[in-house]
Image (cartoon, coloured by chain):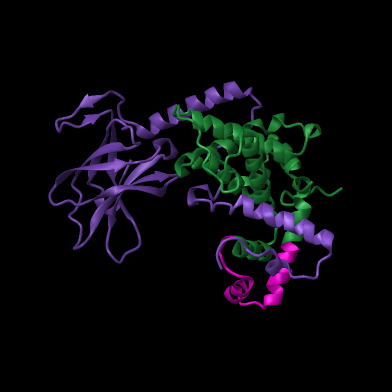
Chain colours: A purple, B green
Amino acid sequence: MTGKPDFRDLVGEDLTPEERDRLEQVHELLIAAGPPPELPPALAEPSTELDEPTGLPRRRTGAVLALAAALALAAFLGGFIAGRMNGDNFNSIRAIPMHGVGAARAASGTIDLGQLDSQGNWPLQVKVSHLPTPPKNGYYEMFLTRHGKIAATCGTFNVHGSTATVRLNAPYNLGRFDGWVVTLERPGNNGHQVMLTT
Amino acid sequence: MQPVSANEASDGELILRTGNGDRNAFEVLYRRYARSVFGLALRRLGDRGRAEDAVQETFASIWRAARTYKPERGPGAPWLYAVARNAIVDRGRMRLEPAVETPEEVSGDAGPAERAEDSWTSWRIHRALEELNENERTVIELAYWSGLSQSEVAEYLGIPLGTVKTRTRAALARLADLLEEELG
């Protein structure tokens, strides 16, 4: 079956005219409204970061929120906030340090964040040191995180040697995230082993 | 008198409780309205990422502004709709881009007033669907948006065709009760 469901098929014939009319109106409204969207996983639960309700005038709360968002973003981006051209011709506006965890405690990294382009892409240059060479068919993947959970991928890369520099991309609104991780990915293994984190 | 549990409370009661800092009431509101807000934001902004941001902003606004809700001025649903619409319009302006109203099949060449009415109606219908029990909601979603016939729904759910029809009819009747204002 395609298209609109048949109202008679749905409700049968044994309805009073009044009830048929009432239900048919609902039927038409359902068709007009279309399906409600599925919530993405990120919206499955309400945000836990809520201040006490204030009742402040809307314009003022908007300004407070904007400031809070800017501060949160600055804290998330961390590092220094001064544009600079690094030695690889990558125009970095932020440098975000990463440190090794677990089996990669000795590793470290830096994310250089480039200028947002007109298409909504944040170019990234990621330098890592002392990450182990992945096992056969393995690779590293960089993710943005939210509330400590992996939320969006920024790309994959490989490492052979003590240091590596790779270009990645974050086509997202970075204000929606609060951290970054680099994970070791192994084919056939569903888990993400976090190796570097901000 | 026993206090009404948050799950059974009206939208207005939940907004009032939220205004007093009741996170449980806020979470019930979120579960009731998150999909409706997300649907409205998707239609208005035409972009999932921005729509997600708009949902977060809407509920942050609800949390902040709940104290200003006056039940004597009207029920909770229109107040929530107004907060959501404002948050979504603000989100649409943030990149200095016009908010996009993606075409809805039914609206065709509708003017602004008609589009606003369509948005409100969709909002109310999606909200009303959340009120159905799971069995009823499932048959409605399968019947209207999966392309399955009633016989196919019965086969898919592994229940008799008569049960599908009974549930569908009951669900439509319940929706009719919930949408009494829209049915005029």
Q: Is residue A35 left or right of residue A23?
A: left
Residue B111 visible in image: yes
Residue A167 magenta-highlighted: no
* Count of labels in the image: 0
Q: In this view, does A186 lie above or below B106?
A: below
Where residue B171 appears, as percent x and y from the top left, is 72, 62
Q: Is residue A13 left or right of residue B91?
A: right
Q: Which sits in the foreground, B120 or A188? A: B120
Q: Residue at x 71, y 41 (%)?
A: B77
Quadrant of the image occupied by residue B87: top right
Q: In this view, does B42 lie to the left or right of B67?
A: left
Q: Give the range drawn in magenta.
A: B145-171
Q: Which residue is drawn at 48% across and 48% down?
A: A42
Q: Which sits in the foreground, B7 or B128? A: B128
Magenta span: chief secondary structure: helix
Quadrant of the image occupied by residue A113: top left
Q: Which residue is drawn at 61% across and 77% down?
A: B158
Residue B17 visible in image: no
Where residue A65 appears, as percent x and y from the top left, is 52, 28
Q: Which sits in the foreground, B156 or A5? A: A5
In the current view of this chain or complex, which residue is farthest to the left? A161
Q: Residue at x 77, y 70 (%)?
A: A13
Residue B157 magenta-highlighted: yes
